[in-house]
Image: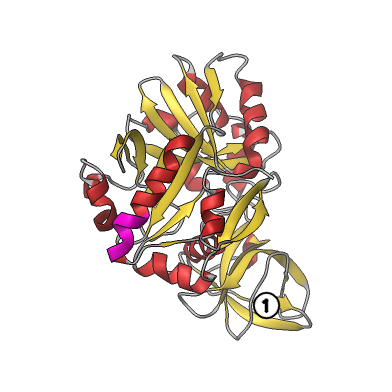
Amino acid sequence: MKQTALTQTHEALGAKMVPFAGYSMPVSYEGVNIEHETVRNRVGVFDVSHMGEFLISGPTALGLIQKVTSNDASKLTIGRAQYSCLPNETGGIVDDLIVYRIKEDQYLLVVNASNIDKDWNHISKYNGEFKAEMRNISDNYSLLAIQGPKAVEAMQSLTSIDLSAIKFYHFEVADFAGIEHVIISATGYTGSGGFEIYCKNEEVLQVWDKVLEAGAEFGIKPVGLAARDTLRLEMGYCLYGNDISDETSPLEAGLGWITKFTKDFVNSEALAKEKAHGPERKLIAFELDERGIPRHDYDIVDTNGKKIGTVTSGTMSPSLGKGIGLGYVPTVLSGIGSKIHIQIRKKAIPATVVKLPFYKG
């Protein structure tokens, strides 16, 4: 089991540790509902150092990124980031990722921990014609997510730059917590604002300690992966391996907005055809009309009990106090307000298709 540079720190804090993507990771400290509420109303800090980071450099770096990603990276200026995905050759998704433009001809790709090797091999396969310089720096860098409405106020004392001036999906390379050249990125996976901090492994303990110290008066708490999941699900953010996979197309998953047909990319021709006639199934968001908790892999059924789809993510929403979930159903049954049922053990619980996000803030 791999460890992050902070594994022993989490253990000392009494975190419940679980295996995740080959790493020993904190799933919770005080409990998912407390940690969830901390991020929604104040500020919390996550260790997500298991994520992967690739540096793509050189005059052909943009060409390679344009080929392997669905979004249009030519729109990125230095200091901007972009959500994107890596389409595969058969209509599915290799991974979703964030692309950062660090310098004129240097980009940072941040990928999911469980897909690091798969993504590296996929991108390398297409680098033959581009010959961009690729470096996998995943094992050398740590990543902290400082999330919540108090994040700017709580962290301002740790840096000389104005944190409130960093717009969503923009970043600065600046001093933070006594460390020079840290990436401070206004991104996150919670829908409650905040920053993601990239630094070297040997620097992260200092950053972690100073973040908790600076945030103490704002009620900061360390937050585990369980609350990260409930927070992202309330926003309807896709989780790779659940809501998107090698078998789901970006158009089915509602990711048409990051799929730009103004350029040629892997499998773009087939995806353009799919867009033209419309996907046969769609990822929907639903709320249960009665008590119950929908879970991953539960059946979605119609009023006659016939299976029409599968729940890809589900939970009891801490913010809304009701069961919520995502899942794929035929496009004809995907309209907002449509009535479906979730098979929870022997009972089919009625549910309604709703518009995302579940949590409106």
Q: Relative to residue 357, is residue 14 drawn left or right?
A: right
The magenta stretch spans residue 300? no
Helix, strand or loop status at disc 1: strand
Q: Position of residue 158 (x, y in %)?
A: 26, 46
Residue at 31% over, 59% down: 215
Q: Residue at x 74, y 84 (%)?
A: 347
Most foreground residue, 236 or 263: 236
The one of 79 and 352 positioned closer to us in this rendering: 79
Mark 1 = which residue? Answer: 341
- Quadrant of the rendered image containing residue 239: bottom right
| Residue 249 drawn at (x, y percent) | 63, 46
Amino acid on which disc 1 is placed: His
Above or below residue 70? Residue 333 is below
Q: Name the quarter where the C terminus is drawn.
A: bottom left
Q: Is residue 333 above or below residue 277?
A: below
Boundaries of the magenta span? 212-217
Quadrant of residue 285 in the image?
A: bottom right
- The residue lying at 41 percent from left, 49 percent from top is 208
